Amino acid sequence: MENTRKKFLKQLFISATAVPVLIEACKKSNTADPAGNNDACTVSPEETDGPYPLYISRGSSIQRVDITDGKDGIPLSIVLDVLNTNDSCKPLANARVDIWHCDKDGYYSGYSNRGYLGNQDNTALVFCRGLQYTDAAGQVKFTSVYPGWYEGRVTHIHAQIYVDNKLKCTTQIAFPDDINTAVYKTTLYAAHGQNSSIARNSADMVFSDSLSSELATVTANSSGGYDLVHPIYIAG
């Protein structure tokens, strides 16, 4: 009943925003420690894959490290570690990791989007989408740009993990509030500015009850961009 209630509330909230597609919330399954270190070795929270998944285009066209497709924005280096809760949270090799996020202006590829720049038809594009297979250390790396935001959500990345072509986890990754604020003050992001709909992760419909497990470590690097590191725990 609790999961049903959450699902209803999240759908109700999104329907009242400008997001054109309902976000269908999924159950929460994580009981990680408050520090976000997941010392309990439990699976990462299950989240919605919407509103902009792209299952019809998840092949060789997005099997790549660089997912920018020429999109402008502050460089973002992404490192994800996949850990197997069925094996004492050891790294899991050869797992498929799919990620996707919006561009700096809050628009997604693969869809016709409505945003602060008006309508954009991005249905034929695959920017900010990628897939990789984990190496022997259970790790994948992507090069992208720092995501923007759209009405009703804070900054985030979607991720799905597959093992032997079976979906094991659909989750999301949050960014620290202070870094979001700093990025959106820069010249590249100033046109859209600060998130006027959801100011902080704690107020976001997805992250409000699971932030400790979904908040990435994000640090500035010497190249003028940011490095994101985050573990994803699955029952492999």
Image: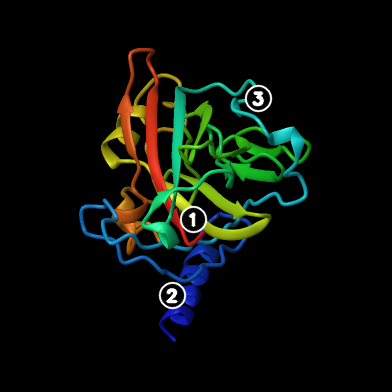
Callout 2: helix, strand or loop?
A: helix
Rendered residue at 33%/55% (across/down): 213
Residue 175 screen position, x and y as percent: 36, 41
Left or right of 190, for residue 15:
right
Please name the amino acid that badge 1 sits on. Answer: Thr
Judged by depth in the image, the label closer to the viewer, 1 or 3, is: 1
Q: Which residue is mark 1?
A: 171
Which label sits on residue 69?
Answer: 3
Callout 1: helix, strand or loop?
A: strand
Left or right of 106, for residue 221:
left
Rendered residue at 39%/33% (across/down): 228
In the orientation shown, which residue stands out farthest toward the bottom?
Answer: 1
Q: Is residue 98 visible?
A: yes
Judged by depth in the image, the label closer to the viewer, 2 or 1, is: 1
Rendered residue at 54%/58% (across/down): 170
In this orientation, which residue lies closer to the viewer: 177 or 35?
Answer: 35
Tag 2–tag 1 contact (CB < 8 Å):
no
- Label 3 Cα neighbours within 10 Å, binned few <14 / some 14-19 / many ≥20: few
> In this rendering, is residue 107 above or below 15?
above
Please name the amino acid that badge 2 sits on. Answer: Lys
Q: Label 1 to label 3, Cα distance in Å?
A: 24 Å
- Label 1 Cα neighbours within 10 Å, binned few <14 / some 14-19 / many ≥20: many
- Label 2 Cα neighbours within 10 Å, binned few <14 / some 14-19 / many ≥20: some
Which label sits on residue 6?
Answer: 2
Callout 3: helix, strand or loop?
A: loop
